[in-house]
Image (cartoon, grey):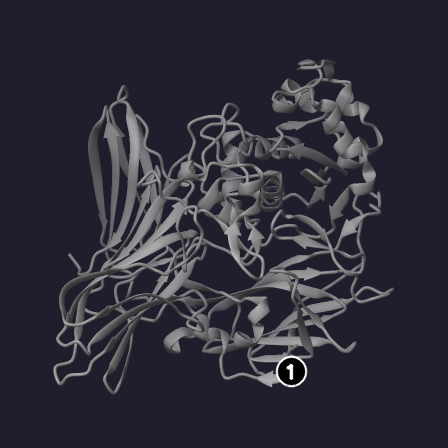
Amino acid sequence: MYKKTILALCAGALLMAFGSSYAQVYSPDLTKVGQADATNLKALTEGIYKHYNAHTDREKAEAIWRFYLTDGRFVKPGMFYHLAGWAYEEPVGQVLDPVKLLNSYGFGLCYQDNPLLAATWQAGGFKHVRVWFLTGHTVAEVFYDGAYHYFDSDMMGYNPIGNGPLKQRDVASVYQLEHNRNIILKNVTSPTTSNPKTVDYPWYPADVRADAMSGMADLFSTTDDNYLYAYNRVPHGHTMDFVLRPGEKMIRYFQPTPASLSYIPYAFDGKQWEVSPDIATWHMKTANGPRSEKDHRTWATGTIEYRPAGTGDASISKQARKTTYTFAMPSPYVIIDANFSLQATLTTAGDKLIAETSTDGGRTWAQSASLSGPFNGTWKAEPARLSGETGRFSAVSGSYGYLVRFTLEGSAKEPPAVQNFVLSTLFQLNPRTLPTLTPGVNVMQYKSGSFVRRELPVRAEKLKEYASRIENASYEDQNGQGYLINKNSEPAEVIFTLTGNNGHDLSGFDVGGRFLDLRNGIAPNKFTAEIRKVTPWPANAKDPGTASISWSTSNNGPWKTLWTYDPKLTWLDGQPIPQVLRWPEIDRSVRDLPAGTRRVYVRYSIDGLAIDHFRLATERPADSAASQHLQITQIWKENGVEQKFQKDILRAGDPQQYEISIPQRAQVDNVALVLECPASKM
């Protein structure tokens, strides 16, 4: 249990990069005109509406549904595909953040695809969306024309009702299917065929072929185990913002390179690491990586390579005969692994060089390798291997940033030395989000960001290492998926201190988390994204709990409220749902901080509600004189012959368009997209 504590550490210390004031490039972004932009859900929906020529709410709802159909036969290139087990990240578990799913993965099961569908509807301007858990299947609904309508991108179907042209018919809701299973079954003309005059194609094609439509109807009509997520189902804590430093480049491939490289997710049950349960349950062939079961679609990989001039923006600490060089290596994509090399000169047997990594802002370190002298040459190291006989699961796998620290210990008058650092981070990505070159004229569009955003890793089970103040809080261990509650029937408070980095002012911050009402003895299962049974808490509670998020520029307030838990549910269609899961995912942003703000305090308050996930991020303005030279290189093959196009953008803050022309009849294979901030100006 936690006691009331004031800690010297603050969340600002968690920043995964050190400040600098030279030639950086902020969030460079390259898209192809006419291609979906998956880095921003609002821009993505606008592109979907335009592509499908969708204008009415009915047309827009269907357009987004079609965009996410998991079988590549029905939409090209197929942004998302059905694959179990691979989209998992500790400590939260199965990935639900839509930006992560779209950009780092591109695959998952119903509990990922359909919440992603709902999140995109929400970004597309619909008044309300909601997600249902049907025990064995997760589905989404969108509200328009005074009613809810169920569409399913994972199982690939929806159910028109009424008369008239299919595209003008109403679409059934989950509630309607619960109370009339014949809405589904009337469309079945034989055990393995459906009526093309009463359903829109595709209509649950795999289930129809398998004579399983009766089971599909049962999912809805057996209502005792149907639960509605009463609040937002997905978190929105991640963005694709990043910074390129001088001497740093990001290479994104269109295929896994090498083919055997992939992020094999491991789950932590509080005691040990094991391959994600879904992979074991579904008997996935991990050696093949996450590969589509229907077509050629696969994952892809990339590398962030940092070759700083000298020590670049490293944090350097010297004491007695010990010197440490600490580099930050953030990534907008989920990290697979890393490797490091440097030139080392160790003159005596007493000289020593140690490499370590940290994914919690330097609170804990995992030693990766060590070297004893005498030595003179290139030294290579990798992060520590944590566990696993399947694949390589390292101390940085599954994270979005880490610190790497090199410590030199000398025993002679001639101190040891290091130089020529090369720091490489390997990551996984969804290649269907990249600007794809095709025969003809390809119009490319470049833009960059104007701020630096840093997401701060916080683990609820180690909260005292992150928060600046904790009052009346207790962490309940639940075999790797516990939660924070208040104790002694008194409210709990957790306060984080957010700071600008290296003296920078803050321009804004993001705050969020997942709150849990556990009175019914049901909690989220991070291993399956479904539900699990827990002891009801508080015991015999009759009234709903309370929770809030607030902030201040002073540790003692006054506090400005960003969110307050409202247990009263509003039913837009007038139809109350008896079984609800009260697990609100909350995300709020503040962008109107007073000028000169260096420090912000964020307060979480809970009483009778639990919280199992904290999300924090800071934002500061980009250095106006720092964004300089960016070099863009696109690599592809025409009829098997490698081609390159290079574009130098001398002022990386200026948006630009340019064209790449490819012969109409050429066979085009996209290879890589490279963004580089050169170590020196042209």
Q: Residue at x 55, y 42 (%)?
A: 280
Position of 277 compared to 536: left or right? left
- Image: 680 above or below 175: below
Q: Where does the image place residue 23, in percent across and percent down from the top left?
A: 26, 63
Residue tagged 1: 3
Residue 596, located in which quarter of the rendered image?
A: bottom left
Q: Quadrant of the N terminus?
A: bottom right
SS type, badge 1: loop
- Image: 624 above or below 554: above
Q: Residue at x 17, y 59 (%)?
A: 681
- Local crowd size for mark 1, using a 10 Å CA cut-off: few (<14), some (14–19), many (≥20): few
Answer yes or no: is residue 590 visible: no
533 or 424, which is in the foreground? 533
Answer yes or no: is residue 360 visible: yes
Q: Where does the image place residue 307, in percent across and percent down from the top left?
A: 22, 60
Q: How many marks?
A: 1
Q: Residue at x 37, y 76 (%)?
A: 502
- Image: 637 above or below 94: above
Position of 335 compared to 524: left or right? left
Residue 54, located in which quarter of the rendered image?
A: top right
Q: Residue furthest bottom?
A: 320
103 or 518, which is in the foreground? 518
Q: Where does the image place residue 570, in percent across and percent down from the top left?
A: 80, 51
Q: Quadrant of the C terminus?
A: bottom left
245 or 146, which is in the foreground? 245
Q: Amino acid at mark 1?
A: Lys
Q: Where does the image place residue 678, in percent across and percent down from the top left?
A: 21, 56
